[in-house]
Amino acid sequence: MLRRAFLRLLKQLPENLLNDPDTQLLAQEADEHVFNIIQMIYRAKSYEGTSKDYEFSAGQWRSTGKPVTLTACATLHHPEVLQRPDNPAGIRTFDLARDGRHKDATT
């Protein structure tokens, strides 16, 4: 929220304040970027070991990679995750499994 407020203020400042060191410092953080943050948590199965983080065999892909890909695809079918945030902070977060909007594709 602050970075967007900085930008709005910078646009209103008189020319003589734009070169002030404090103004320049704030200008480095000012922007109008927006972010959609989509939380997708892989819930490991009880039989999976700790090697799932570094073991990428075909068997591992079938047990973890494919379900994770399906979860990502299911998430992208919700149009709201692709819409630009319009709130003052410019950030919107999603956890579709927690919000009950889709089932965990790994089950």
Image (cartoon, rainbow, N blue to C red):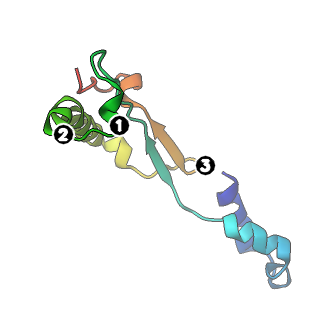
Q: If you read the primary sequence from the N terminus, does the residue marked by circle 3 or circle 2 appear first?
A: 2
Kind of residue sitting beneath label 1? Asp
Please, what secondary structure does the residue beneath circle 2 have?
A: loop
Left or right for 99, reference 64: right
In the image, what residue occupies the spot 28% across and 40% down?
A: 72
Q: Which numbered dot is residue 57?
A: 2
Label 2: few (<14), some (14–19) or many (≥20) C-alpha neighbours in 10 Å: few
Left or right for 7, reference 76: right
Asked if residue 46 is positioned above or below residue 59 in the image, the reply reads above
Left or right for 5, reference 61: right
Kindly report which numbered mark, 3 or 1, lies closer to the viewer in this rendering: 1
Q: Which residue is mark 1?
A: 53
Please, what secondary structure does the residue beneath circle 1 have?
A: helix
In terms of depth relative to the viewer, which is nearer, 13 or 62?
A: 62
Q: Tell me whether the residue at label 2 lies in contact with that at label 1, contact meaning CB atoms closer than 8 angstroms.
A: no
Give how far apart the Cα atoms at labels 2 and 1 are. Answer: 11 Å
Label 3: few (<14), some (14–19) or many (≥20) C-alpha neighbours in 10 Å: some
| Horizontal and vertical percent position of residue 29 | 68, 64
